[in-house]
């Protein structure tokens, strides 16, 4: 039977944030940061042409957040792209510079074949880079590909490790999945106490099925002891 794993709905998300919210690459000096911040202000007040101009100036100065925001404006057709590959090039530059959100977004493009030739192994690599920097959705996506063996050899233990990282960061879908993995012993030793704990965490975030599984574990004759802490 084909295995199923949680895969988040992946749509390109525009991440407008102050340039100071993320560290800049070495080639991005204060001038580029100021331009990027000005682009954010212009975007938030609806001055799209000005935002795009400032983002482009900051992007050419090496500001990776501006590179990402400019790419997203092009993808969303909020500004004209000089050629069909311009958005991809800026996104790739931001991802290569180490911006986790850009790495995740590039992975999504390759995962779904949106504007690029679909390549699951390439998607896996970019998900991994973002996941290693703590990007929660990338951790879940990478875990799912490992769990079902999509674009990479199936590895339940590695999948469990990434689901657990996302669960610890508060991702409700990952909390539910790691609970089922503890319950069934998929990729890690079966542990009903840990299963109950993670079902409880997901339930507290409104997951109805997790609440049902938690109650079932706790009411079973040989059910879990008090959830682990």
Image (cartoon, rainbow, N blue to C red):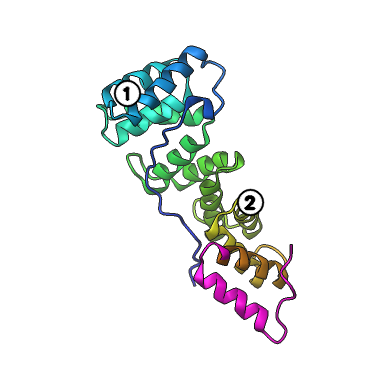
Q: What are the residue bounds of the magenta stretch?
A: 204-229
Q: What label does residue 52 carry, if any?
A: 1
Q: Quick check: 204 above or below 122? A: below
User: Dot 2: what SS?
Assistant: helix
Q: Going 51% across and 66% down the picture, which residue do you hit?
A: 207
Q: Magenta segment: does it hold 223? A: yes
> In which quadrant will I find the C terminus?
bottom right
Decide which of 27, 84 is in the foreground and name it.
Answer: 27
Looking at the image, tell me whether mark 2 or mark 1 is earlier in sequence order: 1
Horizontal relation, residue 69 to residue 207: left or right: left
User: Dot 1: what SS?
Assistant: helix
- Residue 78 point in image, percent of width and height: 27, 32
The answer to whether residue 221 is visible is yes
Decide which of 41, 119 is in the foreground and name it.
Answer: 41
- Residue 89 point in image, percent of width and height: 38, 27
Q: Going 47% across and 21% down the picture, which residue do you hit?
A: 63
Q: Going 57% across and 64% down the picture, which residue do you hit?
A: 204
């Amino acid at each position: 039977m084909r295995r199923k794993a949680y895969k988040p709905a992946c749509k390109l998300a525009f991440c407008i944030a102050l340039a100071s919210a993320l560290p800049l690459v070495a080639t991005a000096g204060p001038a580029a940061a100021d331009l990027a911040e000005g682009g954010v202000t212009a975007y938030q007040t609806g001055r799209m042409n000005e935002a795009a101009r400032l983002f482009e100036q900051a992007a050419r100065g090496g500001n990776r957040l501006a590179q990402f925001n400019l790419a997203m404006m092009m993808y969303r057709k909020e500004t004209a792209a000089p050629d069909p590959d311009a958005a991809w090039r800026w996104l790739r530059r931001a991802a290569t510079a180490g911006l986790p959100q850009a790495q995740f977004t590039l992975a999504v493009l390759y995962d779904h074949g949106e504007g690029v030739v679909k390549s699951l192994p390439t998607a896996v690599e970019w998900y991994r880079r973002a996941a290693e920097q703590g990007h929660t959705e990338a951790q879940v996506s990478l875990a799912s590909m490992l769990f079902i063996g999509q674009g990479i050899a199936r590895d339940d233990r590695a999948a469990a490790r990434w689901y657990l990282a996302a669960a610890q960061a508060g991702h409700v879908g990952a909390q539910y999945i790691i609970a089922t993995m503890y319950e069934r012993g998929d990729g890690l030793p079966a542990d009903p106490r840990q299963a109950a704990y993670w079902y409880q965490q997901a339930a507290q975030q409104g997951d109805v099925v997790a609440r049902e599984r938690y109650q079932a574990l706790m009411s079973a004759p040989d059910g879990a002891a008090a959830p682990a802490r």
